[in-house]
Amino acid sequence: MAAAPPRWAADTEVIRRLEAEWNAIADSWWLRRRLEVWAAEDRRLAFEDGHRLVEAAQRRDVSSWADRDQVLAALLDRFEDDPVAQRVALQVVLPGVKSLIDGLRGWDVEERAARVVATAVEVLAHCAAEPAGTPPSFRVFANTRRRTLRAAIRDRSEPLVLVDDFSQVEGNAGSEASADDEERRLEQLVEWVRERGRLREDAARLVVFTRAGGVTVHELAGARNVAPQTLRQQRLRAEQRLRRSLSLAR
C-alpha cells in the first residue's frame, strides 16, 4: 500500500530535508569553527554549536521579541556575504515557516511548502538588505505570509486560502511597493498603540498585527511556539490597558 501523502509541513520533503541537514551540521566541527570566528567579531553570536544558537534565537522566556532577536539580527548583518549565516538564519525562522505552511490550504502541500520556504529566504535577504526597527523574526513572518498570499491571488488557477482568516487578502493585493507601504503603516500604528497605551512594543505589535494586520492568533502562536490562549490573554491585557489610557486622556 502506498504511503499517504503528507498533510503537515513537518511531513513534507523540503522540511524533512532541511531538518536532516541541520542535524548534520549543527554540531559539526566546521560550524563550531565558524561560530568561533563570528563570536570574535560579534558577541551576539557567541555559541558553542548550532543547536545552542538556534535554541537561544527561539527562546520563549524572554522579556521581548527584540531581546530574543539579537541573534537573528546578528545573522542578518552577515547574510549578504555569508552562505552559512543564510542557512542558520533560515533555521532560526523555520518554526514560523512551518506554521505558515500548516496555516494555508491550496496547492499541493509539497508545492506549498517549497513556495513558503523559498519566499522566506527571499524575505530574509530583503530584511538583511533593508534594515528596519521591527524585530526581524516578526518582520520575516509577516512579510513571508503577505508575499505568499499575494502569489496565491495571482495564481488564480489554484487559489490559496487561509484556514482561519482570508478576509483582508484581496484588499492587500498589489505591488511590492504597496507591501512596503503597508508595512510602514502597520509600524506607525504599532508606535501609536505603544505610546498611547504605554505598552511594551511586543504587546503593541500583538494587538496591531492580529487586529489590523491580517495575522491570526493561531498563526502567531505557531510562529512563537506558544499556546494560542497565552497570546489571547496577553492581547486582552494589552487592549484593556490601552482602553484605560485612552479613557484617561479624554
Image (cartoon, rainbow, N blue to C red):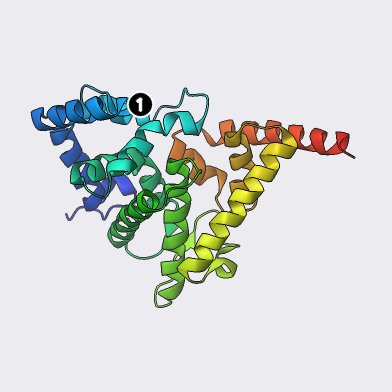
The residue wearing badge 1 is: 56
Query: In this image, 144 relative to 199: left or right?
Result: left
Q: Position of residue 176 (x, y in %)?
A: 46, 67
Q: Which residue: 45% across, 27% down? A: 60
Quadrant in the picture for residue 73 = top left
Determine if residue 17 is in view: yes
Q: Which residue: 36% across, 53% down? A: 129
Taking depth in this image into account, of 41 and 209 the one nearest to the observer is: 41
Determine if residue 165 is in view: no
Quadrant in which the N terminus is drawn: bottom left
Quadrant in the picture for residue 16 = top left
Q: Which residue: 32% across, 60% down? A: 115
Which residue occupies the extreme bottom position in the image? 157
Query: In this image, 76 relative to 236: left or right?
Result: left
Q: Position of residue 144 (x, y in %)?
A: 42, 55
Q: Looking at numbered disc 1 in the image, what kind of residue is underneath it?
A: Ala
Which residue occupies the extreme left position in the image? 29
